[in-house]
Image (spheres, helix red, strand yellow):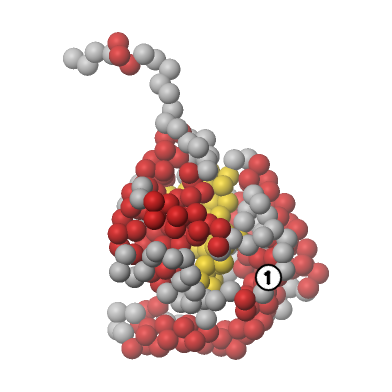
Amino acid sequence: MEKVVKTFIKAADKNYLTKPETKIDLGAWDPNDKSIPGIGKDSEEKFSLELHKELGDLQALLYAQHKHKVLIILQAMDTAGKDGVIQHVFKGVNPQGVKVASFKAPSAEELNHDFLWRVHQKAPARGEIVIFNRSHYEDVLVTRVHKMVPPDVWKRRYREIRDFERMLAEEGTLILKFFLHISKEEQKERLEARLKDPAKNWKFSPSDLPERKFWPKYMKAYEDAIGGTSMPQAPWYIIPSDRKWYRNLLVLAIIVHQLHQLRMNYPVQKENLKKVIIK
């Protein structure tokens, strides 16, 4: 791997990582940031090719070793690029070892259980990468902003989420949480692009527009959720997402860096394969 790529990977993991149990001010995080030197739009394709190859190799190791589990959580305002990250970051990986779980409004059966019941069922098994496209954090975001539950309920859920994620981590799960940070102005442009492009009309929902009125409340809810649940074993990364290519590259680089920390190896065959003769 080129030195400049290694430098970018380490900087990506360091620069956008939040500190555990620290008060978050999203106003201090620029959604249009592109501050890591040595990378530009012109070199993005070259970087991506190298990082995608690295991710493919690491995922093959993860799947073969069958020891670790990886949970990737994507949270964001509409149009910030959750689907785009999944499409661009995970292209080329073995689909046998990668799953995507989305969490819509809970069903009647799910409402009859605790809010983490449906989430735990989707957690990764050994050797798997599972991507949550939205997650259990909806239960301290949407429910809070729209006053669907009283404050004592969503405040209690921060502790329950920490306990849940700590348990997953202790059971061998690498947890990486990404908040795709987009500006309200950039969201407006992307919503307008969906209206203008017939190929993107299907992505537009009139229900997205009223949510923009709650932008300050959502930002406050995200600040509290990120600050209240970021732990060393389940860290949050705040990813500037106004530039799609930079957003994708950062998420890809951070995942590659963290998978390397698992120090994985291919399983050693117990039998002496040198004696095997195939006729």
Q: Is residue 238 visible?
A: yes
Q: Which residue is at 50% across, 60% downward?
A: 12
15 w.r.t. 219: above or below:
above
* Residue 147, horizontal then vertical, whole percent: 71, 78
Image side of residue 87 versus residue 82, left or right: left
Q: Residue lying farthest right?
A: 152
Residue at position x 30%, y 69% from top? 42
* Label 1, residues with CA under 10 Å away: few <14, some 14-19, many ≥20: some
Q: Position of residue 111 (x, y in %)?
A: 66, 63
- In which quadrant of the rendered view does residue 199 lie? bottom left
Looking at the picture, how far across and down is residue 52, in whole percent? 35, 53
Judge from the rendering whether residue 85 lies leftward or rightward of residue 207; answer left or right: left
Q: Name the kind of residue labelled 1 in the image.
A: Ile
Find the residue positioned furthest to the left.
279
Q: Secondary structure at mark 1?
A: loop
Residue 161 visible, this orientation: no
| Residue at the image point whose x is 62% and y is 68% from the top | 138
The answer to whether residue 127 is above or below residue 195 is above
Q: Which residue carries the number 1 mark?
A: 24
Residue 222, relative to residue 73: is it above or below? below
For residue 213, which quarter of the picture? bottom right
Q: Residue at x 64, y 72 (%)?
A: 222
